[in-house]
Image (cartoon, rainbow, N blue to C red):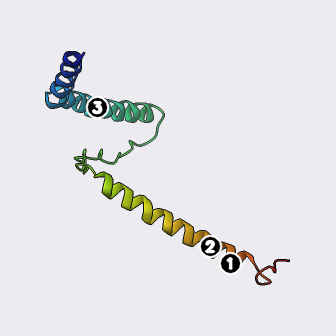
Amino acid sequence: MSSTIGDMKSLLQRLLQGGYVGLLEADVARLRAENRALMNSLLGTAGFPPVEFPEAPKPQPLPRLRKRSWHQIQAWRETGAVRDAAQSLDDREEARANGPVPHS
């Protein structure tokens, strides 16, 4: 069982590190250029001037996500819960336009 997981992991790494992603990006750039040319050809046939398309955005490298420890996650959740509780308490005080309600 663990050998299949290791095989899948190595296959995924080879796909991502290899030239496959680069080939796909090159193909996308080629198709965009082809679409621009076809669009301008159709517009020219209909009597409209060619359209200038903005340059395609450059692919940005993804930031490396940091792995958080359980202590960090727990502290983050606790501060969020305290903030939400304080906010809901403020909302309750604002909802009471005539002051606190007496208990009988």
Q: Are marks 3 and 1 in contact (CB under 8 Å)?
A: no
The alpha-carbon separation of the residues under discs 2 and 3 comes to 52 Å
**Which amino acid type corresponds to the residue marked 1 in the rendered image?**
Glu
Q: Earlier in the sequence, mark 2 or mark 3?
A: 3
The C terminus lies in quadrant: bottom right
Q: Are marks 2 and 1 in contact (CB under 8 Å)?
A: yes
Q: Position of residue 38 (x, y in %)?
A: 37, 30
- The residue tagged 1 is 93
- The residue tagged 3 is 28
- The residue tagged 2 is 89
Q: Nearer the viewer, residue 8 or 37?
A: 8
**Which amino acid type corresponds to the residue marked 3 in the rendered image?**
Val
In the figure, is residue 72 to the left or right of 99?
A: left
Name which residue lies at 68% across and 73% down: 92
Q: Position of residue 43 (x, y in %)?
A: 44, 35
Name which residue lies at 46% across and 40% down: 48
Name which residue lies at 43% across and 31% down: 42
Q: Quadrant of residue 86?
A: bottom right
Give the secondary structure at mark 1. Answer: helix
Give the secondary structure at mark 3. Answer: helix
In the figure, is residue 98 to the left or right of 28?
A: right
The alpha-carbon separation of the residues under discs 2 and 1 comes to 6 Å
Name which residue lies at 14% across and 27% down: 19
**Which amino acid type corresponds to the residue marked 2 in the rendered image?**
Leu
